[in-house]
Every structure is written in C-alpha cells, then in structure tokens.
Image (cartoon, rainbow, N blue to C red):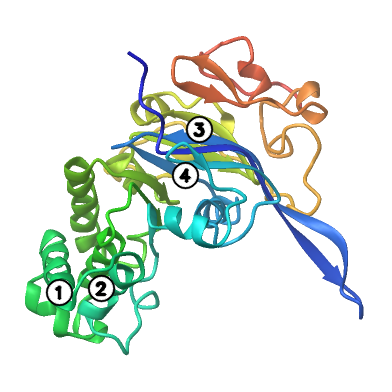
C-alpha cells in the first residue's frame, strides 16, 4: 500500500527581487531571497522553518500562499500544481491553505467584530445562510477556547492571547488542510505562548492539519515541531526529525544555532560553536557553500562548489561537503580555513 501524497510539496522554489535604480528604475541586481528550496509536509505534521532574520523563511511562506509570485519552481497543494493557477482555479485551492500571522494586534481589522472576522472567509467560500454561518462561527470560536458570545466583541476587547486565538479561528473557518504560522507566538507574553502552542497541537491532532511553522525561537520549535528545516541565506542547509537535530546537528550552521539557545539551568556549562562575521548580502552571495565565509570547518571545496541537499541517513538531509560521504560524527574545527 503506497503512502498518501503530502499535503504540500515545494520543489526547487526560487524568488529573486529586482534592485531598481536610476530615473528609469532599471534592474541593476537581484536579491536572492529564496534560492532552490525543496520540502514536503504530510497531513498531521509540523515542519518548522528556522534561521536568522533575513534568511528567507517568511518569503517561503508568502510564496506557498501565493501572496507573491515565485521566480521559478513548483508548489503542489494536495497533489495539484498551483504555481501558475489564476482566477477561479486559484481561488478554489486558496481555501485549503490559510495563515496565522505574527502580530495579533495588526492582523485583525479593529472595525469588525470577532464574528465578522471569523465569518468573512465563510462568506467568500461557502454559500450558507446567516444563521448557519453564525452557528459555524460560534462553534469555531469555542473550539479555540473563546465563548460564543465573543463574536459580538471587537478586537480591542481581547487580550493578546485571545486575539491570536481569534486569528486561529479565522484560519480554521473554511476547514483548510494546511496552515502557515509565521512567528505566531513571538508577539505574545511568555505566559500565554505555551497555551497557544498547545492549542495548535490539539487542533492538529483533532483535524489532521499540516503546519508550516516559521520561527527563530528554538524553544518554541522544539515544543511543536516534528521535523525542522534550517535555512541560511535563502537555502535549506539541513532537514531532520526534531529529536535527531537537537541531539546531533549535522550542518555547522545548525550546530551554531542550537548552541546559541540559552540553557534552562543558568549554572550549566557547555562547549559552544561560535560563528563570527556577518551574514553576506543576498544581492551578492558568496560562491560555493554560502556559509563558508563564517564556517570554522570550511575546506577548499566549500569555496567553489555548491553542496547539494543530500540524504545522509533515513529522513536526514544536509547540504555540507563534509557530510557528503554519510559521516555523522561530531565535527571538530580545522586547523586552517
């Protein structure tokens, strides 16, 4: 029996933004925001996309939603290539992918009631009467932990955590198969972050939702993720199951990210891989491995040859020349670079 098709498949996705200068606004360069990204997400799975600010992870989310158009590559949603769909054809597929935004204060229209905010997607996609729509809105609000009477309140009457629950309810209203969550708890108090994360996990288990979860917070990622994709300067450098990545990161950048996270016990000590220097410009990225300018393990091959994202063990992919032979031992800094 063959495995079911993934909910989302992204293949060799690229997005280059032109740099315009002069009176005629001519393109003189390109920002390589996303450069050859590939991954898939199954039903009931959370793939976390992590990396430094500016690495391209939020751009990937916007491309999957078709908020912006890709330069090249393929996006398949439920087995259908949606990359070039337009008009009614795209509208039909758009209902299957929804988004939970980062800022619950900015993503909700302050002039609309909660009931109108959650019910608006139903008006766009489902032909149901007013009473039926109101019943559906009440049910969705209760599912995310809000009372049905909350539908008559305005966003300013909710706390930050409640507003994000309202944003989740809006995303759930049309029964999507995929939800893209872009830093959904970073604007919330620490005390309510876990509540929202646990809500997302409970909804996923109940509804078999697929999540593309975008974050820079490794603590959050470790709590909610199943697999993790690490991005650096527009490219994925490692994909691995959560437990395996945190136990033994294979790419030097992944190792540095994990080492940079604070330990729960402030008295604990550990050896850390510290990377120096700044992230290169995506307008003029370095040749070869884009991380080689900051990598303490770089060899001559890293400076000239782009490493492919290769499977080095079941379910583990890494783009690193030092891992090309399947070596999964811990790396040690080379004597010279």
Q: Nearer the viewer, mark 4 or mark 3?
A: 4
Q: Nearer the viewer, mark 4 or mark 2?
A: 2
> Which residue occupies 49% across, 30% down?
239
Circle nearer the N terminus (4, 3): 4
Instruction: Write down the residue under mark 4.
Output: 49
Q: What label sits on residue 134 in the rendered view?
A: 1
Residue 196 vs residue 288: left or right? left
Element carrying mark 2: helix
Q: CA distance from mark 4 to mark 3?
A: 15 Å
Circle nearer the N terminus (4, 1): 4
Circle nearer the N terminus (4, 2): 4
Element carrying mark 4: strand
Q: Is residue 273 visible?
A: no
Element carrying mark 3: helix
Please tell me whether residue 90 is drawn above or below residue 35 in the rendered image: below
Q: CA distance from mark 1 to mark 2?
A: 7 Å
Q: Nearer the viewer, mark 4 or mark 1?
A: 1
Instruction: Write down the residue under mark 3.
Output: 255
The quadrant holding residue 288 is top right
Q: What label sits on residue 67 in the rendered view?
A: none
Q: What label sits on residue 119 in the rendered view?
A: 2
């Amino acid at each position: 029996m063959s495995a079911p098709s993934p909910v989302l498949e992204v293949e060799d996705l690229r997005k280059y933004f032109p740099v315009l200068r002069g009176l005629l606004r001519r393109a003189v360069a390109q920002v390589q925001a996303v450069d050859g990204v590939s991954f898939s997400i199954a039903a009931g799975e959370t793939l976390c996309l992590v990396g430094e600010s500016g690495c391209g992870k939020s751009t990937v989310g916007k491309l999957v939603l078709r908020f912006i158009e890709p330069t090249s590559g393929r996006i398949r949603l439920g087995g259908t290539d949606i990359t070039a769909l337009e008009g009614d054809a795209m509208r039909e597929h758009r209902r299957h992918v929804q988004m939970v935004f980062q800022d619950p204060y900015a993503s909700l229209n302050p002039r609309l009631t909660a009931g109108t905010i959650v019910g608006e997607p139903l008006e766009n996609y489902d032909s149901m009467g007013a009473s039926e729509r109101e019943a559906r809105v009440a049910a969705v609000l209760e599912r995310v932990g809000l009372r049905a009477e909350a539908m008559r309140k305005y966003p300013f009457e909710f706390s930050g955590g409640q507003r994000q629950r309202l944003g989740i309810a809006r995303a759930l209203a049309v029964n999507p198969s995929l939800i893209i969550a872009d830093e959904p708890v970073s604007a919330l108090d620490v005390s309510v972050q876990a509540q929202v994360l646990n809500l997302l996990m409970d909804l996923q288990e109940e509804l078999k939702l697929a999540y593309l979860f975008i974050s820079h917070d490794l603590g959050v990622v470790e709590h909610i993720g199943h697999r993790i994709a690490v991005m650096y300067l527009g490219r994925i450098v490692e994909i691995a199951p959560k437990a395996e990545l945190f136990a033994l990161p294979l790419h030097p950048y992944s190792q540095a990210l994990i080492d940079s996270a604070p330990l729960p016990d402030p008295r604990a000590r550990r050896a850390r891989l510290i990377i120096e220097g700044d992230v290169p410009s995506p307008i003029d990225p370095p040749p070869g491995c884009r991380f080689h300018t900051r990598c303490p393990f770089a060899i001559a091959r890293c400076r000239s040859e782009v490493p492919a994202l290769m499977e080095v063990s079941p379910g583990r992919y890494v783009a690193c020349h030092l891992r090309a032979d399947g070596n999964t031992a811990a790396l040690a800094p080379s004597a010279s670079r």
